[in-house]
Amino acid sequence: MTGLAAPLWDVQNGQGLRQLFELGLALLLSSLIGWERAAQQKSAGLRTHTLVGIASALMMEVSQHGFTTVLGMDNVSFDPSRVAAQIVSGIGFIGGGLIFVRRDAVRGLTTAATVWLTCAVGMACGGGLPVLALATTALHFLVVRGYPRLSARLVPGTATNTFEARLTYRTGTALLPRLMQICTRRGFRILQVKVERLPAHTDNAARVLLELDGTQDPAHLASELFEDEGVIDVEITAATDDE
C-alpha cells in the first residue's frame, strides 16, 4: 500500500502539481505550434501536434517518476534516458508518413520536421526544462514565419508559392490549353491537373483544378485568367501539402 499511496501524497508535497503544470505547458506550446500549422492548411495540424506534445511530455514524466518505487530494490537499475531515446525513434514513424514525392518534388519535409520539434518541446516540458521549451517554441515561429521573408529579401525570386487554382470555364472552345499556357508563361510550374465536368444545366461548363508552384504573385495570375471570356470563375487557395 505504501508504494501505491506515494504518488497521491506527492500531489500535496508539490511534485504532482509540478507534473500537471509541465503537462499543461506542453499542451499550450504544442497547441500553438499546431495552430500555426493548421492556419497554413498543412496536413498535420492542431490535433496532431497537440497530441504529440502531450504524449512526449507524459512519457518523459513516466521515465523520471514512474519507476521510483522499484529503484530501491536489489539488482534493479534504471536509465531514464532510454525512454527519451525511444521517443525520438518512435516519432520518426509519424514524420515519415508525412513525407512523399510527387513528380520529382518532395513534399511534407517542413511538416515532418515541425512534428519532430513538437516532440522535443513536449520532452523538454516533461523533463523539467520549461525555459528551453518556451525558447524553442518562439524559435519555431521565427523560422517558419520569418525565414521565408528573409530568404525572399536576400535572394529575390527564390521564395516559391504552392497553391491551387480552381477554374470554372465553358467547354467546346479548347480553352484549357490556353489557360495552362497562361500559367506557364507567368512562370508557374503545373504540378497537377484535374478536370471535372459539371452537370448539363450549368451551360456546358467544366471545372479544372490546377496545382501550381512558382515565385510570382498568384493574384496577378488570377486576374489574367479571369480576363478570358470563357472563364466563369477563378478561385485561388493555398495548397494543403508542405514543402
Image (cartoon, rainbow, N blue to C red):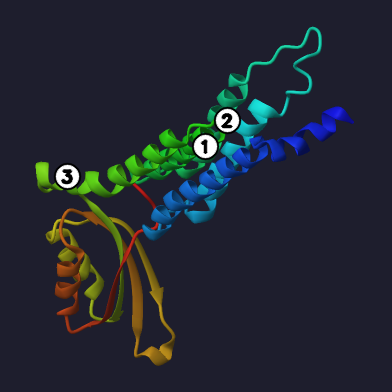
Instruction: Give how far across and how far down residue 162 sits, in percent.
Output: 28, 55
| Cα distance in 3D space between marks 1 and 3 | 30 Å
Instruction: Give how far across and how far down residue 173 sits, in percent.
Output: 23, 80
Asked whether the residues under the numbered discs 2 and 3 touch, taking CB atoms below 8 Å apart as contact, a structural biologist would say: no
| Cα distance in 3D space between marks 1 and 2 | 14 Å
Name the residue type under label 2: Ile
Point out which mark residue 150 bears.
3
Q: Residue furthest right?
A: 1
Rendering quarter of residue 177: bottom left
Check disc 2 and report the residue beneath it.
87
Element class at badge 2: helix
Q: Residue at x 41, y 40 (%)?
A: 134
Q: Residue at x 65, y 37 (%)?
A: 14
Name the residue type under label 1: Cys
Q: Residue at x 42, y 33 (%)?
A: 132
Instruction: Give how far across and how far down residue 157 sits, in percent.
Output: 12, 48
Q: Residue at x 13, y 61 (%)?
A: 186
Check disc 1 and report the residue beneath it.
125
Q: Is 158 displayed left or right of 143 in the figure? A: left
Mark 2 vs mark 3: which is more N-terminal?
Answer: 2
Q: State which mark lies toward you, 1 or 3.
A: 1
